[in-house]
Image (spheres, rainbow, N blue to C red):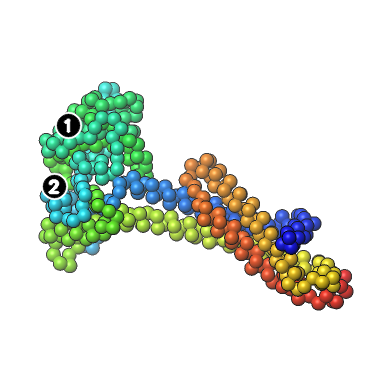
Amino acid sequence: MRFFAILRIALNALRRNKMRTVLTMLGIIIGVSAVIAMVSIGTGARAQLEAQIESMGQNIVSVFPNFRRGGVSSGASGGEGFTVGDCDAIASEVPGVVAISPEVRAGGQAIYGNKNWSASVYGVNSDYLQIKSWNVVSGSNFSEQEVRTAAKVVLLGKTVVTELFDGNDPVGEIIRIRNVPFVVMGTLEPKGASLMGSDQDDAIIMPYTSAMKRLAGNRAAIRSMIIQSESPAVMSLVEQEVTTLLRQRHKIQDGADDDFMVRTQDQINEFATGTSKTMTALLGAVAGVSLVVGGIGIMNIMLVSVTERTREIGIRMAVGAKARDVLVQFLTEAVVLSLLGGGLGIALGMGTSAIIASQMNWPTLTPGNAIAGAFAFSAAIGIFFGFYPARKAAQLDPIEALRYE
């Protein structure tokens, strides 16, 4: 009951100076709302990145060419590429590999009737969809037999289906790519944007042998390989074994640079989300400065309140109030100010995040621990910056306080 009495007195004291109370809380409100909004934007962006990385598949290890000349790397666009033998060797000799698919990139206009559409063409094997966790929504995947015979069959992404067939089921229809007819065997579920922002659904999937023989006259190289390991725990081991095997197969001497790059899904995840985490922390820290400024404002106002209420403090001590009671009273007022400001700041921050998400199409996500942390930090600000004024009030001499005018 004593706690509620103290709380009631604190609320009455704050209510007597409504404008000053609101202005004092303003620093906390702005600081907390800024922290919530910044963390929401940063967390939303990171969640979107992680979703895009997951769309690559599960437990993925990717291998790209990397040709160096004069100490300069050409990256994935350089090098001589890989051979079918490289893929077969990894599948049979590297432990922990569940599936592997070569990737042959090609391009060209896809034509159906009087419509045409320029899409990315990917030559892969029959394991590719399993590795990428990509489901067929209509029709079926091509078989390993069709890969061996370089069959003229394709799977279409959602965007290609929309552009060429107005969204109608194209299974069984024939499209032409570079004047070569291909039968549509199936359509793929929507994937959305990739990590680099490209449309993953704007894709035509075919056997890699078909891409090499039918579209490029055997001139196309295997530009990359995508490997699925049996679990996240063995991805690092698979990376090491693939590196060792390819160095042997490519006859790379000790000390010489690799002509390929091996990247695990965890490495891609860390690279992609690292910048987002840094920016979120930086923005949160900048917004946190507002909280400190708000806390200084609370301390300033509480010191003014102590001065204004010196006679009141003297009367309370004269009728039996102890120094500890006065300390708790003023500390409670500071904490109430901070918590009210924190609550309003959380509401304002979440509202700001919702407006940003709807008006600017930015992904936002407000984690529960951010709300709890902002609320707890508000209370800590009240205790930290309210303690000195409260202690000063508790140390007043009752006789001198009664004489104060």
Name which of mark 2 and mark 1 comes first in the sequence. 2
In terms of depth relative to the viewer, which is nearer, 270 or 220? 270
Quarter in which the C terminus is drawn: bottom right
Residue 166 locus on image (x, y percent): 34, 25
Secondary structure beneath dot 2 equals helix
Residue at image x 88%, y 74%?
Answer: 403
Q: Nearer the viewer, residue 281 or 6?
A: 6
Can residue 381 be seen from the camera position used here?
Answer: yes
Residue bearing mark 1: 152
Which residue in the structure is indicated by mark 2? Answer: 84
**Location of residue 384 by image quarter:** bottom right
Tell me what residue is drawn at x 79 percent, y 70 percent: 321
Above or below 395: residue 348: above
Is residue 110 something that shows in the picture? no
Three-letter amino acid code of the residue under disc 2: Val
Q: Is residue 358 left or right of residue 186?
A: right
Relative to 57, 363 lies left or right: right
Percent position of residue 212, x then y: 15, 40
Q: Position of residue 250 (x, y in %)?
A: 13, 57
